[in-house]
Image (tube, rainbow, N blue to C red):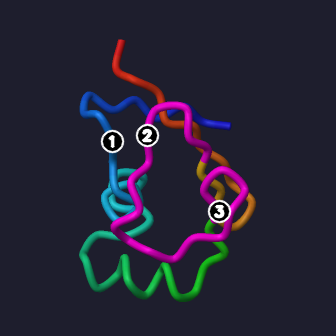
Amino acid sequence: MTAIEINTPFITLGQFLKYVNLASSGGEVKAHLAAARIFVNGVAENRRGKKCYPGDRIEIDGTSWCIQPCS
């Protein structure tokens, strides 16, 4: 599992996909959300506006990330 540090209270799922270089535009985010198996804290998710907070775990096609507050 890879830790992702954010310096804001939350990051949206769409912003997260761009941050980890799985999408480069809003259109790619929408397409990726429709095609990939994405889970936030073990729950299937397809909303690009879903807010992810420190401590949340995101899993996309078998790869996992954990949101961490910036140190």
Q: Identify the residue shown where x is 33% and y is 32%.
A: 6
Mark 1 lies on residue? 10
Left or right: 36, with 52 as reference point = right
- Asked if labels 2 and 1 touch by Cβ distance under 8 angstroms, the answer is yes
10 Å neighbourhood of mark 3: few (<14), some, or many (≥20)?
some
Marks 3 and 1 sit apart, C-alpha to C-alpha, by 17 Å
Q: Tell me the amino acid under the disc marked 1.
A: Phe
Mark 3 lies on residue? 39
Secondary element at tag 3: strand
- Asked if labels 3 and 2 touch by Cβ distance under 8 angstroms, the answer is no
Magenta extent: 39-57
Marks 1 and 2 sit apart, C-alpha to C-alpha, by 5 Å
User: Which circle marks residue 53 in the picture?
Assistant: 2
Report x, y in % for residue 62: 75, 60
Q: Reply yes or no: does residue 8 show up in magenta.
A: no
Q: Reply yes or no: does residue 44 show up in magenta.
A: yes
Q: Identify the residue shown where x is 59% and y is 51%.
A: 58
Report x, y in % for residue 40: 60, 56
Nearest to N terminus: mark 3 or mark 1: 1
Q: Nearer the viewer, residue 53 or 27?
A: 53
Quadrant for the N terminus, please.
top right
Report x, y in % for residue 70: 34, 20
Q: Nearer the viewer, residue 1 or 48?
A: 48
